[in-house]
Amino acid sequence: MNKFTLTGAAILVVALGAYAVTRSSEQTAPAQETMAPAEGAAMVAVTLPDTLSPEGTMGKRAFDAVCADCHGDNAAGKMGIAPPLIHKIYEPSHHGDMAFQMAAANGVRAHHWKLGDMPPQPGVTRADVTSIIAYIREVQRANGIN
């Protein structure tokens, strides 16, 4: 046999061996399902700060009472319902504190997320929203959003 025939046969054996190993691992690997997150599931993972300021603590209570039903626990958002507030879109340089005050007082048209408009929250005072903002900003900072 010449060198080229021997080299070609060796390459063919290696290729067939690699193919067989790949096929057997594909057949024994568990099938992964790619399911969309369920409606209402958290949209982002949120890291909480070790402690909250007194105003942040009051804001968390107010957030949990008024906002969490739509915006999720710890403002992580709810798939198909309302966006996460712990997200770069809501960083102070893009959505300042006044944007939160206006959203609570007047509602807001959906513009960053296709989840529908937010209605006004008439039972929430400006002081409540100020505390909620303190909470949101503290959690944002804990997640690298400044």
Image: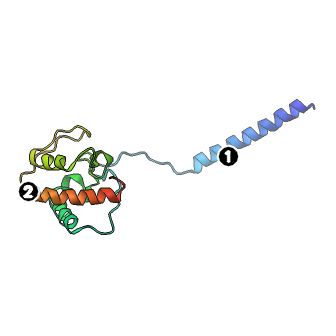
Q: Residue furthest front?
A: 93
Q: What type is the residue that disc 1 sits on?
A: Val
Residue 81, given in percent of the width and then of the height, sits at 23, 47
Question: Which numbered marker is on residue 106?
Answer: none
Q: What type is the residue that disc 2 sits on?
A: Thr
Disc nearer the start of the sequence (1/2)? 1
- Say if 58 sits above or below 95 in the image: below
User: Does dot 1 land on a helix, a strand or a loop?
Assistant: helix
Q: Nearer the viewer, mark 1 or mark 2?
A: 2
Q: Alpha carbon of mark 1 to alpha carbon of mark 2: how far?
A: 65 Å
Q: Residue furthest right?
A: 1
- Pick the residue in front: 5 or 121: 121
User: Is any atom of residue 124 visible in this view?
Assistant: no
Instruction: Please give the residue where the numbered disc 2 appears in the rendered image.
Output: 125
Residue 102, given in percent of the width and then of the height, sits at 13, 46
Instruction: Please give the residue where the numbered disc 1 appears in the rendered image.
Output: 21
| Tag 1 near tag 2, CB within 8 Å | no
